C-alpha cells in the first residue's frame, strides 16, 4: 500500500459552531515581560501608566480550542500610580442590546490580596470608565475566591469553592441584555477546573440581575474587553479569550486527512480532535478539470471532545488523477469544506469501465471509464431485451485517460439496465439498477 499525501495541519471546519467576535491567544512571540501595547495595536491603554504586560508563557487546558497557543497577558498588584494600569481590546463591532455575549478565558492566579479587586471586565466600544461584568479575586483560605459584579454595585462572591493558586481554570461569562428597564441586564459566571461544557448549564456560581441589581443603568452597547492591574488585584495570567454569541466553543477540528492507494482502490482516512453538532461528512471527488461529485456519506459523532477516526473506500477506479475533499455538515444543515487532496491511480489495464455511482440510483448516476489512447468511443445504455434506450457518447473522439459521464434515467421504467463501452474493436459492459 502506497501512502500518497498527508495533510497534517490542524484544520477547523464548522467554525459556525460559534460566531466569534474576538479570539485572542496572545501569540506575540518570545518578548517576555514586554508591554502589551508596544507589541501589538490590538490592545490599547485607557488608564494608568504600566501593566498589564505580555508573558511568553501561555496557559493550557485540555479540550479547549484556544489552549497552548502563543503566550498570555500577565497582571499583578502594586501601588496606585506606580504600576497600575488598564488595557482593552475592542470587538470588531460594538454589540447592541439584541444579543447575548459569551466570554471564555483561561485564568491562572499565582497570589491574591485579602482585599478583593477586579482584574477582568467588559466595557462599551469607547470604553471610558464605564465597566460591565467585572471579575474579582481575593485571598480566601489557602487559595482564592472569585466574585462578580455587573457594574458598580457590590460584588457577589463564590464563598463555597476555594480556587487553587497556580492552577488554570476556564472562566465562562455571559452578559444578557434586557430592555424592560434601565438596570435589568443579567450577568453570569461559571468556573471549570477540567473539561469543556458542550452546552450552557443552568447553574452559574454567580448570577446578578435582573431589575434593581444595577446602580448606574445598563449600557446600550458592549464592544471591548479589558485586563486590569491595580492596588489590590491578584497576580496571574489570562489567555485564550474567545467572545461570541453562543455557548458552543468546540468546532469540528480535522487534524489529518490522508489517502492510501491499493490497485484501483483509494482509502481515505481522517481524524477529528473535537466535534460540535456534527451530522457527518459528504465525501466528494472530481477528475482532473471535472466537477465535484458526492460519492458517499460518513456519519459524524455529534458533539464530542474525544478524538474520532473515520475512513471511506473509493473502489473500482480507472487510471487517472483524482481529487478528494470532505463536506462537514452540522445538524442544522450548515457546512464547511476541508482542503483538497490529490491522488494518482495507475492500474495495469487502462481500458476500463467502472461501476456507476450511485447504484441503485434515482434518477441520476455517474459512469466512469478509461481508454489507453485517443480514439472513437461509444457509450450506450440497453434494457434487458437488448434494446438501446440511451446513447451517452456516440462515436466521439476522446483523449486518452479517465472520463466521466452523467446519466439521467428520467422517462425510463424502473429496473436493471446494461451500459456498454465500445472502443477500438473492444467492449466492456456492466449492470446498473434504476429505482424510482
Image (cartoon, rainbow, N blue to C red):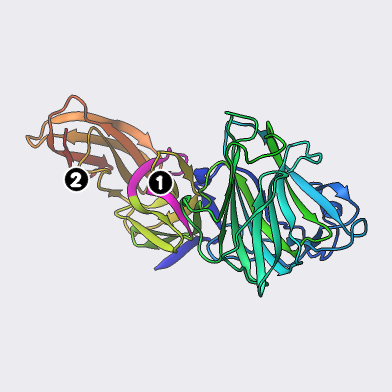
| Residue sticking out furthest to the bottom | 142
Of 145 and 195, the residue lying toward us:
145
Instruction: Determine which quarter of the picture holds residue 77.
Output: bottom right
Residue at horizontal 77%, vertical 64%?
55
Q: Is-magenta flag for residue 409?
A: no
Q: Is-magenta flag for residue 295?
A: yes
| Residue sticking out furthest to the top | 411
Labelled disc at residue 285? 1
Dot 1 alpha-carbon crowd within 10 angstroms: few under 14, some 14 to 19, many 20 or more: many
Up the image or down, 179 lies above or below 306; here it is above
Residue at horizontal 53%, vertical 62%?
63
Q: Is residue 122 left or right of residue 355?
A: right
- Where in the figure is residue 239, as x and y percent of width and height? 68, 59
Please identify the quadrant where the C terminus is shown: top left
Of 10 and 137, the residue lying toward us:
137
Distance from the alpha carbon under mark 2 to that under mark 1 = 22 Å
Q: Nearer the viewer, mark 2 or mark 1?
A: 1
**Disc 2 target residue:** 430
Amino acid at each position: 500500500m502506497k501512502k500518497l499525501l498527508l495533510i497534517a495541519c490542524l484544520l477547523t471546519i464548522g467554525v459556525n459552531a460559534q460566531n466569534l467576535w474576538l479570539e485572542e491567544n496572545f501569540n506575540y512571540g518570545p518578548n517576555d515581560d514586554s508591554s502589551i501595547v508596544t507589541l501589538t495595536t490590538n490592545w490599547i491603554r485607557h488608564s494608568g501608566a504600566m501593566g498589564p504586560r505580555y508573558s511568553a508563557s501561555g496557559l493550557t487546558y485540555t479540550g479547549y480550542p484556544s489552549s497552548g497557543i502563543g503566550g498570555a497577558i500577565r497582571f499583578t498588584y502594586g501601588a496606585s500610580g506606580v504600576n497600575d494600569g488598564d488595557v482593552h481590546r475592542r470587538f470588531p463591532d460594538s454589540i447592541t442590546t439584541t444579543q447575548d455575549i459569551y466570554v471564555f478565558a483561561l485564568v491562572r492566579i499565582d497570589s491574591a490580596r485579602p482585599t478583593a479587586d477586579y482584574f477582568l471586565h467588559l466595557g462599551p466600544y469607547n470604553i471610558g470608565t464605564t465597566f460591565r461584568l467585572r471579575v474579582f479575586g481575593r485571598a480566601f483560605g489557602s487559595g482564592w475566591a472569585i466574585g462578580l459584579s455587573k457594574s458598580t454595585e457590590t460584588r457577589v462572591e463564590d464563598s463555597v469553592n476555594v480556587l487553587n493558586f497556580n492552577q488554570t481554570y476556564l472562566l465562562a461569562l455571559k452578559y444578557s441584555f434586557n430592555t424592560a428597564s434601565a438596570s435589568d441586564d443579567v450577568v453570569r459566571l461559571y468556573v471549570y477546573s477540567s473539561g469543556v461544557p458542550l452546552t450552557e448549564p443552568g447553574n452559574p456560581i454567580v448570577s446578578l440581575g435582573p431589575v434593581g441589581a444595577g446602580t448606574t443603568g445598563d449600557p446600550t452597547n458592549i464592544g471591548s474587553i479589558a485586563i486590569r492591574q491595580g492596588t489590590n488585584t491578584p497576580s496571574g495570567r489570562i489567555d485564550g479569550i474567545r467572545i461570541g454569541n453562543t455557548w458552543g466553543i468546540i468546532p469540528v477540528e480535522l487534524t489529518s486527512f490522508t489517502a492510501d492507494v491499493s490497485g484501483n482502490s483509494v482509502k481515505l482516512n481522517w481524524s477529528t480532535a473535537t466535534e460540535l453538532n456534527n451530522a457527518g461528512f459528504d465525501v466528494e471527488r472530481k477528475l482532473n478539470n471535472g466537477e465535484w461529485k458526492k460519492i458517499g456519506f460518513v456519519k459524524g459523532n455529534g458533539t464530542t471532545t474525544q478524538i474520532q477516526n473515520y475512513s471511506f473506500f473509493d473502489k473500482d477506479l480507472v487510471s487517472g488523477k483524482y481529487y478528494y475533499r470532505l463536506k462537514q455538515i452540522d445538524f442544522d444543515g450548515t457546512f464547511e469544506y476541508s482542503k483538497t487532496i490529490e491522488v494518482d491511480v495507475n492500474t495495469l489495464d487502462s481500458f476500463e469501465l467502472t461501476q456507476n455511482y450511485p447504484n441503485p440510483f434515482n434518477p441520476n448516476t455517474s459512469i466512469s471509464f478509461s481508454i489507453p489512447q485517443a480514439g472513437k468511443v461509444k457509450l450506450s445504455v440497453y434494457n434487458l431485451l437488448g434494446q438501446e434506450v440511451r446513447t451517452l457518447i456516440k462515436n466521439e473522439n476522446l483523449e486518452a485517460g479517465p472520463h466521466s459521464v452523467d446519466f439521467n434515467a428520467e422517462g425510463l421504467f424502473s429496473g436493471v439496465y446494461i451500459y456498454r463501452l465500445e472502443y477500438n474493436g473492444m467492449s466492456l459492459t456492466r449492470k446498473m439498477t434504476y429505482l424510482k
